[in-house]
Image (tube, helix red, strand yellow):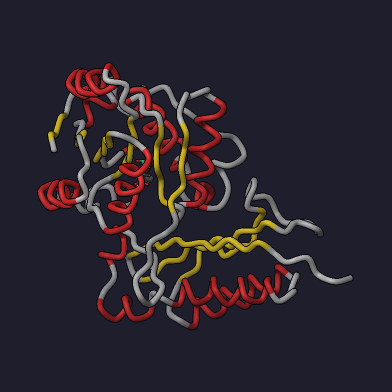
Amino acid sequence: METVSTIESLRRQVAAWRSGNERIAFVPTMGNLHVGHLELVKRAREQADRCVVSIFVNPMQFGEGEDFGSYPRTLEADREKLSSVDADLLFTPPVEVVYPPGKTEQTRVEVPGLSDILCGSSRAGHFVGVATVVCKLFNMVQPDLALFGEKDFQQLMVLRRMATDLCFPLEVIGVPTVREKDGLALSSRNGYLTPQERTQAPALYETLKLTSDALMSGERDYDSLEFRAQKRLVAAGFRPDYFTVRRAADLGLPEAGDRNLVILAAAYLGKARLIDNMTAFLPLMEA
Ligand code: PAF
């Protein structure tokens, strides 16, 4: 697997594949790869002839006081993992290549409505940073398809909408969350957990599951479900940011008759801010 750091060398390689009519998949990442990322590459390899992976810790999506400086950078280990799943090309642009004028002078991409709620409300500017960098990466790579993990459900929705609104000729594919045996969703930020916190962490998944089970068995008092879930998380040692039941199609508040729902949660455990979600397609209830 070759590694390139400039747009010119990236485009040269992609153009060569394209001239042979090859279909190109793209997996954008911030590195510190885990099995969830490798699953994205495996799916990409099933659906395309070539897979490009980027590793770029994007300063524009981190707020003041967030973990940009301490975000784990593990390039050598990442490279080995990517080779083991047959990624074709690794793109590791330095910050000057992605933001030549500096990130404050950069043209920005904003997806209204979806960007400023939930994670976007507690992390101001986060989704503008995500949408802007992914838009730029899409233009650099020009893939036929791009794959993202469903763990970042809101991010996936923001990026799908961006791709549609800006007429990118590509397909955005969501890949199911990979979990540890005890249910904890794989995330680079799990590395921030102490051994003690790691034993508490599955409570997030368990609480989503309990809420989903309650919805599936007919409970519709969302306020009460959310209140009980937050209480449970606090008892397990979390500091919840939000725990909410939303419509899966647009993250709006569910109304009577909505059946395609998603439960979304973000909560701090020690230094780690963990997010997770679970979709629930409600059965038709008898009147
Ligand atoms: O999910 C991530 O790792 C990042 O938000 C992404 C999509 C690579 C953009 O920096």
Quarter of the image for the N terminus: give it. Answer: top left
Is residue 168 something one can see in this rendering?
A: yes
Question: Residue furthest toward the front?
Answer: 20
Question: Residue 205, position in %: x, y?
Answer: 47, 72
Tell me: residue 163, above or below residue 33.
Answer: above
Q: Residue at the location (47% across, 34% down)?
A: 171
- Where is residue 234 shown, x and y percent of the image? 50, 78
In the rendered view of the protein, which quadrant contains the C terminus? bottom right
Residue 104 shows in the view: no
- Quarter of the view holding residue 270: bottom left
Q: Nearer the viewer, residue 119 or 180?
A: 180
User: Ligand 1 is in which quadrant of the figure?
Assistant: top left
Q: Position of residue 193 (x, y in %)?
A: 29, 70
Quadrant position of residue 183: bottom left
Q: Position of residue 74 (x, y in %)?
A: 15, 51
Q: Nearer the viewer, residue 5 or 95?
A: 5
Residue depicted at x 19% and y 47%: 82
The front one of 46 and 14 is: 46
**What residue is at 24 percent from the left and 20 percent from the top?**
11
Task: Residue at 27%, 16% (x, y): give it.
Answer: 19
Say how many tags the image has: 0
Left or right of 228 in this view: 122: left
Report which quarter residue 178 is drawn in: bottom left
